[in-house]
Image: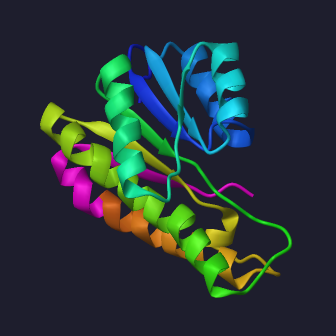
Amino acid sequence: MDIKGKVAVVTGAAGGIGFALSRALLAQGARGVAMADLDPQLLDERAQSIGALAVPTDVSDEDAVHALVARAESELGPVDLFISNAGISPKPIRDDNAHWDQQWRVHVLAHLFAARAVAPKMAARGGGKLVNVASAAGILMQMNSAVYTATKHAAVGLAEWLAVEWKPKGVSVSVVCPL
């Protein structure tokens, strides 16, 4: 996708891959980037440093993802690209149900919530792009974490399904599995 003049949303954007993507999108001519993250202070600092819109968001909450998209569209314009990048790998690794639920919501449901929030609008406008960031653990495994492995595998499977579902409607879906 040629990003020039387009509007993007990036989750997990206060650091690491998300911040690097946000900065790169603006450097490549994006009209605007809405950066989302749980850490409002760091998010605001990072967004201000590159001229992006900071929108504190809990991607595990579907209503919050819809609010993120509404704010991005209100302040920047229709979303052309949504990069669902938020992820967690809490230390120490736990195996309790709360930990499984948290990772399921962030690593899988957040991608679904993003697609629900933007894909129908993208299709109605004639196209758009969803990028779901999973992990190499989604095609291999994480040696010491069943929950990370399982949720990242599920994220890859969901992205594959979204790609098949939305491609005929003009919305491209990709999954990225960094090491």
- Please say whether residue 176 is one of the residues in the magenta stretch: yes
Pick the front one: 134 or 53: 53
Quadrant including the C terminus: bottom right
Question: Residue at left 32%, top 26%?
Answer: 73
Pick the front one: 17 or 136: 17
Q: Decide if residue 128 is on the left or right side of residue 48.
A: left
Quadrant including the N terminus: top left
Q: Is residue 21 above or below residue 137?
A: above
Quarter location, residue 20? top right
Image x and y of residue 63, in percent: 36, 52
* Image label count: 0
Quarter location, residue 140? bottom right
- Please say whether residue 83 is one of the residues in the magenta stretch: no
Residue closest to the far left? 124
Image x and y of residue 92, in percent: 86, 73
Pick the front one: 96 or 138: 96
> Can I make out residue 150 in this image?
no
Q: Decide if residue 125 is on the left or right side of residue 167.
A: left
Q: Is residue 30 above or below residue 95?
A: above
Quarter location, residue 111? bottom left
Image x and y of residue 174, in percent: 45, 51
State which region is magenta: 164-179
Coloration of the structure image: rainbow
Question: Residue at left 49%, top 67%?
Answer: 108
> Can I make out residue 38 in this image?
yes
Q: Decide if residue 56 is on the left or right side of residue 174.
A: right
Question: Residue at left 56%, top 17%?
Answer: 26
Image x and y of residue 83, in percent: 49, 42
Question: Residue at left 81%, top 76%?
Answer: 93
